[in-house]
Image: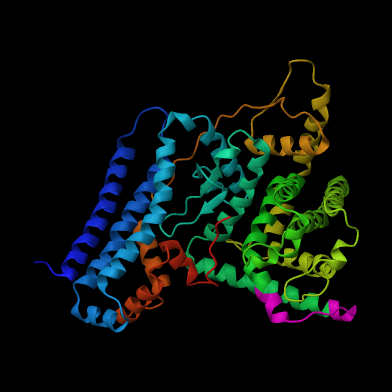
Amino acid sequence: MRTLTEQTQELVQAEWNSLLATMDYWVSAVDEWDGDPPLPASVRELVRDAHYFAHRYKEIFDSIAGDGEVVKILHDEKTDVWTVQHQAREALLSEWDTVRQAVEQHLSRRYAEHLPRLEQMAAESIAPLFPELAGEAIVYFHKVFDITRFAFSRMPVIGVPFSALDLPDSWLSIPHEAGHYVFWNGTPSLTEFAAFYAEMERRVIRALTKAFKKREAQGGHFKRSGEIYRTWLLWMNEIFADIYGTLVAGPASGWAIQRILRTRLNQGDLYHSHEDPDHPDAYIRPFVHIATLTAMAEASDGDFREALLEAAKALGEAWRASWSDENLERTLFTPDNWGSMQEVLEIDLPLVVRAILDTRLPGGISLRTRFSDGAFYTFDRHQWISSVVESLPHLPSGETVQVGSPLDMSIIVQLAIVAGVDHSRVQGNFDYQPNEPERADRDRWFEEFLANATGSGERDVQLRAWRRIIRSTASEVAYGGLHHGHSHNH
């Protein structure tokens, strides 16, 4: 009769074989697919990336199973090699599930009309910084807007809720998700990501230190400055994405977040939202967009400067008016006795936004510099979009406005809603051709992942590291060793 250990070993090996066989099938399926709809090359490459990584990943645990000294190490930590193998497979399966959903939807005619236009919008949102990656964006439908970062691929994979299928104004969440992509995957390697993240942390800490001195000079009072530093640093990823979305979509991004928050919150939620460690307080968050527009105005001149300042002012007035209490900012609780909400909004937040705008991205260029260079939202674009919105009420009967960019369409629809103008006559006329991605250097990526995940080249140290971190996905393992361990699921 087989022992319990032998039965466990057989089950775990069968689980792994099943996962790898499924991946083998999908690699063959995407390689052979020449049907309708056509399959983007980026989807084919993502499947190959995941397939390669899974086989290399399992090699690690196969080597564990055959090493008596390793078994001894793991037993000292009150586990066994088969438990570790099972947990590794479960963590990898959660990442593969996202890849599989994306592939299945791209092979279905049901989504043939919808996915290309959303992928075009994702490409437009990423192009200001990474034109070479813009055409590799992959979109799939599930429950919420989010973006998945992988240790095995740099391709942007953006989730869009089914409810957003035909609502162009809701697509403005895509530039925000593109901001998360730039934050996590915009650097060519994990080592460069660590340097980028560390510089942003330093700049934010310096900005807050300056803010605290300014508050004290004005007679402000607050407690637990350490908690304030920690909370802003945990919010850094979300603030970066909000800033990026505003740089891409301009004032429409600010109007979109206000509309979303109004539909989901009541006034009582404003007093407790800081209990979410990853996202800025619900009341604070719209002011990130306002502070970004103000910073954009400072980097502009003439009519564009005035237009951005006017939009920032209108957004501030609209958000404050949403809660019908002129004294709200004086009475609203802030996390851990930070002081008054007015101090947070008028002193801390603008300085944090400027710190993030000035952090150097790959190539030594900051978001502020790229905006000044005209890579993001421009005055010409602002004028054209404004003219389209103003023309909508005066269109002759039966006439529509044809827009060739999903990003422009979503901005126009959002601003038309704010202006109370019928936006149903804005029609999309899209023709999107994704790029052919270059073949990934998969072996280099895997070796870098392994080094960053374990922090050592010594075998015993590596194995103890795997025991500690195996319950996380491969990407959480890779990035978690380089910062506070925060992972994004927006």
Q: Number of numbered discs present?
A: 0
Side of 435 relative to 410 (left or right): left
Can you name the residue that lies furthest to the top here? 397
Side of 201 relative to 282 (left or right): left
What residue is at 69 percent from the left and 76 percent from the top? 229
Side of 381 relative to 241 (left or right): right
Q: Is residue 282 above or below residue 132?
A: below
Viewer-nearest residue: 342 or 249? 342
Quadrant in the picture for the C terminus: bottom right
In x, y percent, where is residue 286? 75, 55
Quadrant in the picture for the N terminus: bottom left
Q: Is residue 215 above or below residue 365?
A: below
Q: Is residue 366 visible?
A: no
Quarter occupied by residue 291: bottom right
Q: Is residue 309 visible?
A: yes
In x, y percent, where is residue 178? 59, 51
Q: How is the image coloured?
A: rainbow
Q: Is residue 47 one of those drawn in magenta? A: no
* Magenta stretch, residue numbers: 215-230
What residue is at 58 percent from the left and 69 percent from the top? 197
Quarter occupied by residue 169: top right
Can you name the residue that lies furthest to the left here? 1
Q: Is residue 201 above or below residue 181?
A: below
In x, y percent, where is residue 334? 76, 70
What residue is at 30 percent from the left and 64 percent from the top? 86
In x, y percent, where is residue 399? 74, 18
What residue is at 31 percent from the left and 43 percent from the top? 26
Viewer-nearest residue: 24 or 298? 24
